[in-house]
Amino acid sequence: MRLSRFLTATAFAALLLPATAEAQRRIPDPQIPPPSITEYTPRNTLVVPEHPVPSAKFPVVDMHGHPPTLDNPENIATVLAAMDELNLGVMIQTRGSSGERLTNQINAVKAAGLEHRFAFFTTLDLRDVAPGSGAKIAAQLEADVAAGAVGIGELNKGFGLFTMKADGTRLTLDEPELDIVWQTAGRLGIPVFVHTGDPAEFFEPHDMENERWLEQSIYPQRQLNDQARFPTFDELMAERDRMIERNPGTTWIIAHMSWYGNDLGRLGELFDKYPNTVGELGAVLYDFGRQPRFAREFFEKYSDRILFGKDSFQPAEYPYYWRVFETNDEYFDYYRDYHAFWKLYGMGLSDDLLRKVYYQNAVNVIPGLPTEALPGN
């Protein structure tokens, strides 16, 4: 009898849980006019220890650099000054360049005597792909590598979303015509740095439950939920995975941690399935900083598979990364409210793990990377 009553009570409680959770989510209507979402910026009253980190503890390779074009002494000097303040040992220029635009930057950096502080990835012209295009693109890749490029990328999100083939159809990530390009990269020993899609929320309905509602309201062009125009998030990632699977001899650097920072189990499955992949941290700090303990466990488990990258070159934003990675600070701001309305917490990574993420993994993944400005070289 007691067991029967217990089971009945348990079943009743289970039925009540959804309703209770729904009730807890409801907020009573304000009795005075409420502010808009952009006006409500409450002052933080929490008093806790703070440890700002203006300069990284160890020299860093920024493998997702988007500085201005490095083809003149003024730009080079401006970027170098910021790098020195932040303790960036090497900046990889991943702002798309190939041919003369690439060699102009390489030559300018050499003329400044700074080839030990900058490295360059080349880009690919993927417009109007047709039979025979792959061989032409591969030939340009060989020329760019001979000129000094040490990788491909950043292949931006247009690849898979907006770029069209010569016949007017969408260029999918797993387009067989491009296999010769990826195989050429593998033969040359250079990685391919690929940015696929955008956060999954951009592909979802733009409603009041969308975690990125504000960002998409500020920038409506970031909405990708029109399935008449775009593939779904999962379809896009499946194309990317087929491209990787068909080219196991190529090293793939997955930009923005594949936008899986909010689902580290899924990211771990990607790493486990494809040992020729590594992840890059640019523009997803907000996800790691809101789950510091679980994220630290993930970093420890996949310590050889994570590379530092920042994306947008805004020097004032780098210290947020140092603070999340190097301290145990609590409840501090992210640098862009429209990316994340929540606070960040420090992960407290060990020195050994910081060295790997900051520079050692990049040295291992990018054979042509200059190392003179890095420890032990």
Image (tube, rainbow, N blue to C red):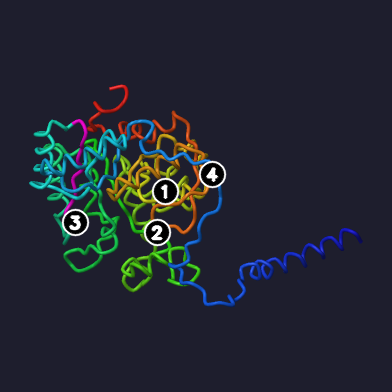
- From the viewer's perspective, tell me whether residue 91 is left or right of residue 233: left
- From the viewer's perspective, tell me whether residue 318 is left or right of residue 184: right
Q: Nearer the viewer, mark 4 or mark 3?
A: 4
Q: Residue 285's mark?
A: 1
Q: Which residue is mark 4?
A: 294
Residue 117 magenta-highlighted: yes
Q: Mark 3: which amino acid?
A: Leu
- Kindly state the secondary structure of the residue where label 4 is placed: helix
First reached walking from the N terminus: tag 3 or tag 2: 3
Q: Residue 126's mark?
A: 3
Q: Which residues are magenta?
A: 116-125
Query: How many angstroms separate mark 1 from mark 4 (CA)?
Result: 14 Å
First reached walking from the N terminus: tag 3 or tag 1: 3
Query: How many angstroms separate mark 1 from mark 2 (CA)?
Result: 13 Å
Q: Mark 4: which amino acid?
A: Phe
Locate residue 18, reporting x and y percent: 66, 68
Above or below: residue 182 compared with residue 336 = above
Query: How many angstroms separate mark 4 from mark 2 (CA)?
Result: 20 Å
First reached walking from the N terminus: tag 1 or tag 4: 1
